[in-house]
């Protein structure tokens, strides 16, 4: 059943109840007024009849005259019952039906009119003491007079007001409730279909429908935010699983690399020793040059093996209070000759106050050195490489489980060739490199990322092809 129909039926019930109460009071008032008028008319009629009964002369018998008049056909057809009564009950005549009210009026010789139930009673005394009287009884007189009033009042007013209330209810409910609810139902269907960006615009102020519309809009916003959060969590879960698989592969590679390093370390030392002996022997210059090449390549392989061991056997860093400014200055000074060879100028930007962290000095120095080396190699045409040390308020990127707050920040930026966008996700994978033969092993950034992660920090990179790259290292500040 529609809301308008329910409301209309409720209004009809309320209207009928109110009208019934009103009609009850109105009928009482009308009954009182009608009774007064009727009794006044009956008294007038009774006085006229009394005059007729006693106006026949001194020899006339009022009782006989009354019996004669009451027996006339006109009186019988008028459905008026007539009786002779005695207030004293003499002569075998009945007493007045009206009781004490009739006795008191007849004793004074007055005409008496009254109501008993639905009957209208009139008494005409036939003697001055009222011992004998004519009783006129009109059965159902009051019902005949008052019933039309009650029926007309209740039925007529109920029909008129109910019709008007129905029209008004359907119009108002349809406009103020039905139309907005239809739009809210359409919104609910769109949300159920997955359109969580759907909204309904209802300018309904602060009424119930407007409140419902605002709550549904808020629900859609909450569902949309929840879905985005679930999608991010799902993506993070997939990424975590991939990282776990990758970590498992790296663990296997690390074990193999560690074994390989131990197996190859001794032969490489032997090769290097013999090559150094040949190089130091006087004689054929061509043999000495070949020995020098063998020695350089053996040293190169030894460095690669040491890098593999660093990845496979990285231990717990020895942490102490450090000023990152001093480490940045030391790395810049140490690599200054190499920078000049690459025609690169190192620009160091640092704050006037210390940037203190608790870290392993050698490992953090290795991080800065590796980043600077990569910047030099990414700037074949020379230029400037900037190193910036500062404190920043940062929000960790997605996937990094660290609180927001103030961190130590190291950035190394070059203006070289930049990094291809498709290579950015793989930069920190071991052995991944786009450098030419003999220019790199693909282990430097993997070592950097591992060291920084061990220090509860993270590394980010941004690059634009042809304009350069910027690596940023974030480390927790030393607690005060």
Image: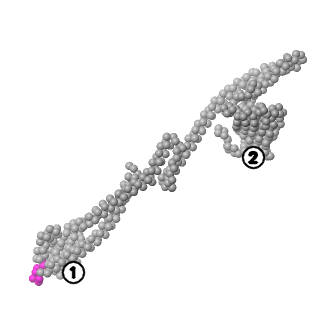
333 or 93, nearer to the observer: 333
Q: Is residue 60 found inside the magenta-colored segment of the image?
A: yes
Q: Is residue 459 left or right of residue 283?
A: left
Quarter of the figure with residue 122: bottom left
Q: In the figure, 218 relative to 432: above or below?
A: below
Q: Is residue 426 left or right of residue 131?
A: right
Label 1 secondary element: loop
Residue 381's x, y, as percent? 78, 32
Give yes or no for contact between labels 1 and 2 (Cβ–Cβ under 8 Å). no
Q: In the figure, 306 relative to 464: above or below?
A: above
422 or 120, nearer to the observer: 422
371 or 305, nearer to the observer: 371
Quarter of the figure with residue 48: bottom left
Residue 130's x, y, as percent? 18, 79
Which residue appears farthest toward the right when viewing the image? 282
Instruction: Kindly report the distance in space between the C-alpha atoms of the residues bearing marks 1 and 2.
Output: 118 Å
Within-10-Å neighbours for mark 2: few <14, some 14–19, many 20+: few
Tell me what residue is drawn at x 45 percent, y 48 percent. 182
Please report whichever mark, 1 or 2, sits nearer to the chain's N-terminal start. Answer: 1
Q: Is residue 468 visible?
A: yes
Q: Which colour scheme is used?
A: one colour
Q: In the figure, 420 relative to 403: above or below?
A: above
Q: Is residue 7 visible?
A: no
Tell me what residue is drawn at x 63 percent, y 29 percent. 245
* Residue hosting label 1: 108
Residue 249's x, y, as percent? 66, 27
Q: Residue 449 carries which label?
A: none
Within-10-Å neighbours for mark 1: few <14, some 14–19, many 20+: few
Q: Is residue 122 found inside the magenta-colored segment of the image?
A: no
* Residue hosting label 2: 480
Q: What stretch is highlighted in magenta?
A: 57-63
């Amino acid at each position: 059943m529609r809301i308008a129909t329910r409301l209309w039926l409720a209004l009809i019930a309320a209207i009928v109840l109110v009208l019934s109460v009103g009609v009850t009071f109105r009928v009482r008032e009308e009954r009182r007024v009608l009774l007064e008028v009727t009794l006044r008319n009956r008294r007038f009629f009774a006085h006229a009849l009394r005059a007729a009964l006693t106006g026949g002369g001194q020899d006339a018998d009022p009782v006989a005259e009354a019996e004669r008049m009451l027996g006339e056909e006109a009186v019988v057809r008028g459905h008026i019952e007539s009786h002779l009564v005695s207030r004293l009950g003499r002569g075998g005549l009945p007493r007045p039906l009206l009781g004490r009210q009739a006795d008191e009026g007849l004793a004074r010789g007055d005409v008496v009119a009254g109501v008993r139930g639905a009957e209208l009673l009139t008494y005409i005394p036939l003697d001055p003491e009222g011992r004998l009287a004519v009783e006129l009884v009109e059965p159902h007189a009051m019902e005949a007079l008052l019933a039309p009033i009650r029926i007309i009042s209740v039925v007529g007013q109920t029909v008129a007001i109910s019709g008007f209330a129905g029209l008004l209810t359907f119009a108002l409910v349809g406009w103020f409730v039905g139309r907005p609810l239809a739009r809210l139902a359409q919104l609910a269907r769109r949300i159920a279909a997955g359109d969580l960006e759907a909204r309904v615009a209802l300018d309904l102020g602060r009424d119930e429908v407007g409140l419902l519309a605002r709550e549904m809009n808020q629900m859609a916003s909450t569902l949309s935010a929840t879905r985005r959060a679930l999608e991010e969590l799902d993506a993070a879960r997939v990424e975590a699983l991939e990282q776990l698989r990758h970590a498992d592969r790296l663990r296997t590679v690390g074990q193999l690399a560690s074994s390989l390093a131990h197996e190859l370390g001794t032969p490489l030392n032997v090769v290097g020793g013999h090559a150094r002996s040949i190089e130091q022997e006087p004689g054929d210059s061509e043999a000495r040059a070949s020995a020098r090449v063998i020695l350089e390549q053996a040293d190169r392989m030894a460095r690669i093996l040491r890098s593999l061991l660093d990845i496979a056997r990285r231990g717990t860093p020895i942490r102490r209070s450090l000023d990152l400014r001093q480490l940045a200055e030391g790395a810049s000074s140490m690599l200054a000759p190499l920078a000049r060879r690459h025609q690169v100028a190192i620009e160091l930007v640092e704050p006037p106050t210390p940037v203190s962290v608790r870290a392993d000095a050698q490992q953090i120095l290795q991080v800065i050195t590796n980043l600077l080396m990569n910047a030099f190699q990414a700037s074949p045409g020379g230029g400037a490489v900037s190193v910036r040390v500062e404190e920043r308020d940062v929000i960790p990127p997605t996937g990094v489980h660290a609180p927001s707050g103030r961190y130590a920040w190291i950035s190394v930026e070059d203006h070289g060739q930049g990094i291809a966008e498709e290579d950015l996700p793989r930069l920190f994978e071991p052995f991944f490199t786009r450098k030419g033969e003999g220019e790199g092993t693909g282990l430097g950034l993997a070592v950097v990322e591992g060291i920084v992660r061990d220090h509860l920090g993270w590394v980010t990179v941004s690059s634009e092809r042809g304009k350069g790259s910027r690596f940023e290292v974030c480390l927790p500040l030393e607690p005060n």
